[in-house]
Amino acid sequence: MRIGSGPAGPAKAHGSFTSVGGLWPLLSMRSFSAVTGPKADRWLVRTVAGLMVANGLAQWRAEPSPQGIAGARRIGLGTAATLAAADLAYAIPGRISRGYLVDAVLEAGWLLAWARSGRSRA
């Protein structure tokens, strides 16, 4: 699987994915809840969404230097690992919609993509 081109390719691709995911509930909580299930604490959904947008933009704007890409990689790995862990911890026992298991798979894909991009440059 090859994501993006050049040294900043994974950062831009993952940053875009994370930003769009964060923008969704901010722009339409109704459609987000229709897909992911009802939300008891909408303030928390909006807070996480804002953090996702901030993380995604930081990745997307990473300088195409070794230091910039390393920072974007750390943000990407941390974001994907945190979201996947929450998806699994709460969807498997049924505390949140099982639809979040799809996101867990997507986040695992980003972890794999970052792992591969690190090896290809090493």
Image (cartoon, rainbow, N blue to C red):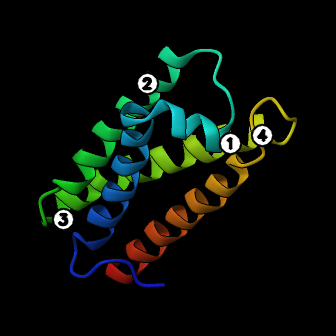
**Which residue lies at the image location 33% right of the left edge and 69% below the top edge?**
10
Counting residues from the N terminus, which is met first, the one under dot 2 or under dot 4? 2
Residue 95: x and y in percent read 80, 29
The quadrant holding residue 69 is: bottom left
Residues at discs 1 and 4 in contact (Cβ within 8 Å): yes
**Number of other residues with Cα within 10 Å of mark 1, as a class: few under 14, some 14 to 19, many 20 or more:** many
Query: Which residue is labeled 2 in the image?
Result: 46
Query: Which residue is labeled 4 in the image?
Result: 91
Query: Which residue is labeled 3 in the image?
Result: 66
Residue 117: x and y in percent read 39, 75
Q: Specify the amino acid type for callout 2.
A: Arg
Query: Which residue is labeled 1 in the image?
Result: 87
Counting residues from the N terminus, which is met first, the one under dot 3 or under dot 4? 3
The quadrant holding residue 85 is: top right
**25 sits to left or right of 72:** right
Q: Specify the amino acid type for callout 1.
A: Asp
Q: Alpha carbon of mark 1 to alpha carbon of mark 3: how far?
A: 31 Å
Q: Specify the amino acid type for callout 3.
A: Pro
Q: Tell me the element at label 4.
A: helix
**72 sits to left or right of 26:** left
Q: Tell me the element at label 3.
A: helix
Tell us which disc is closer to us: 3 or 4.
4
* Residue 122 vertical position relative to residue 89 in the rendered view, above or below: below
Q: Alpha carbon of mark 1 to alpha carbon of mark 2: how far?
A: 17 Å
* Residue 100 vertical position relative to residue 9 in the rendered view, above or below: above
Residue 64: x and y in percent read 13, 66
